[in-house]
Amino acid sequence: MAERKPIESWLTDMDGVLIHEGVPIPGADAFLKKLRDMERPFLVLTNNSIYTPRDLHARLARMGLDVPIPNIWTSALATARFLDAQRPGGTAYVIGEAGLTTALHDIGYVLTDHEPDYVVLGETRTYSFEALTKAIRLINTGARFICTNPDETGPSTEGPLPATGSVAALITKATGKEPYFAGKPNPLMMRTGLNAIGAHSETSAMIGDRMDTDVLAGLEAGMETFLVLTGLTTPADVDRYPFRPSTVVDSIADLVERV
């Protein structure tokens, strides 16, 4: 195996890597400080499309984690970037929260339920049967189906919650149409993120707690990958996948000296 170039830029997932159920993971603050002190380009990525980068910056700040707004990249931003490239100035029927609607407004999209170009499904804690029914009918009459991320479950203090991927499966079952997922593990999210900070995959690393999104996304984008065990994945889970991370570590604290 060819020796990789030194890591110059870092991409890291948020939930399960930097925070867990609203609490900072030990070592996260030291890791972020080291990135800033060393002036390393970095991005905090999340497949959660509920919040805007400004919202996430404030939420992380309240936990004692300093992540500048330009260093936050969400599946909502990746979705908006994709749609802007595919059909500039288009229209969309959106199921989601402010993170997604703001991203689409910012690229000049009109949100409508009248013959939209796209149905865009994102994360929300209040999926409405009425909204899902409308989405199904719009897709059946020609709207293209886009989904921010494929995660089937998400974390909460009470346990796993059904997430965007699960709801997308319901719509697919009703329409026979598979969505295009813009978030991880789609390498598109990684490439647009790398472009946002002027980084290159051969000198970048991805840190995550999920094999099926974080590690796979980093692998397919050509980056070095680190799996942390502070989130959803256990050591036993790793061997169930046909691919492996470059390195498995207990937590983000183990990577401070790698920066």
Image: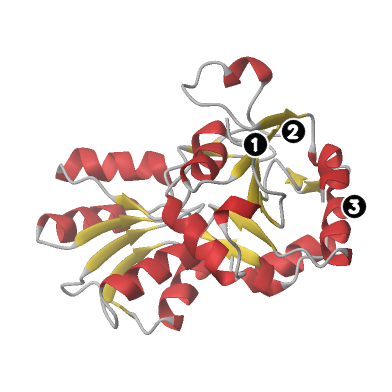
Q: Could you give the CA–CA distance between mark 3 and mark 1, rounded to whole angstroms?
A: 18 Å
Q: Could you give the CA–CA distance between mark 2 and mark 1, rounded to whole angstroms?
A: 7 Å
Q: Quadrant of residue 10?
A: bottom right
Dot 2: within a 10 Å radius of its alpha carbon, few (fewer than 14), some, or many (20 or more) residues? many
Mark 3 or 2, closer to the camera: 3
- The kind of secondary structure element at disc 2 is loop
Q: Quadrant of residue 188?
A: bottom left
Q: Which residue is drawn at 74% across and 71% down?
A: 68
Q: Which residue is drawn at 68% across and 50% down?
A: 14
Q: Say above or below: 236 vs 146.
A: above
Q: Residue at x 63, y 14 (%)?
A: 236
Which disc number belongs to residue 209?
Answer: 1
Q: Where is residue 80 in the image (x, y as percent from the top left)?
A: 41, 70
The amino acid beneath tag 3 is Ala
Going from N to C along the chain, the mark reached first, 2 or 1, is 1
Q: Name the residue under label 3.
A: 30
Label 2 close to label 1 by CB (< 8 Å): yes
